[in-house]
Image: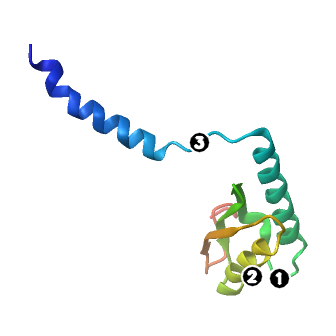
Amino acid sequence: MRLPIIFLPLFVVAVMVSSCVTEPPRSAAEIAADNQIEMEVMQKLDASTTIYARHIDVKARGGVVRLSGDVTDGYELVEAGRLALSVPGVKKVRNELEIDMDGRGKGRGG
């Protein structure tokens, strides 16, 4: 019966791929630290008089902050990254913000 032997390489590849994309579990302390970083970054963005932070999402994992959402111009994009990096505990910022030049944004009824 050769059928199981045919599927063995596919199974091995599937296991290898899934192990590459699975992130290791975080401890309660790591989760708490990342939650604290997220909160502090959002507070800095909200306190800024030059950034409309309502459409910015902040996620942290292991001190790496990911900013996503939309801003109105390049200045806001750069400034959001700079402010995030200024928060204690932030090691790196992945700035995935997009410039929404028409101002409608994903959450602004457009």
| The C terminus, quarter of image | bottom right
Amino acid type shown at disc 2: Glu
Q: Which residue is mark 1?
A: 50
Quarter holding residue 82: bottom right
Q: Which residue is mark 3?
A: 24
Nearer the camera: disc 2 or disc 1: 2
Amino acid type shown at disc 1: Thr
Position of residue 32 measured from the top left corner of the image (x, y, whole percent): 82, 46
Q: In terms of sequence position, does the residue under pointer 2 or pointer 1 come before the other?
A: 1
Rounded to the nearest whole Å, what is the CA distance between mark 3 and mark 1?
Answer: 37 Å
Amino acid type shown at disc 3: Pro
Check the image and name the residue furthest to the bottom.
Answer: 75
| The N terminus, quarter of image | top left
Q: Pointer 2: residues within 10 angstroms few (<14), some, or many (20+)?
A: some
Of residues 73 and 66, the one drawn nearer to the viewer in this rendering: 66
Q: Is residue 82 above or below residue 4?
A: below
Mark 3 in CB contact with mark 1 (< 8 angstroms): no
Q: Is residue 65 above or below residue 52?
A: above
Question: Is residue 44 left or right of 85 when viewed as pictured?
Answer: right
Q: Which residue is mark 2?
A: 79
Of residues 95 and 33, the one drawn nearer to the viewer in this rendering: 33
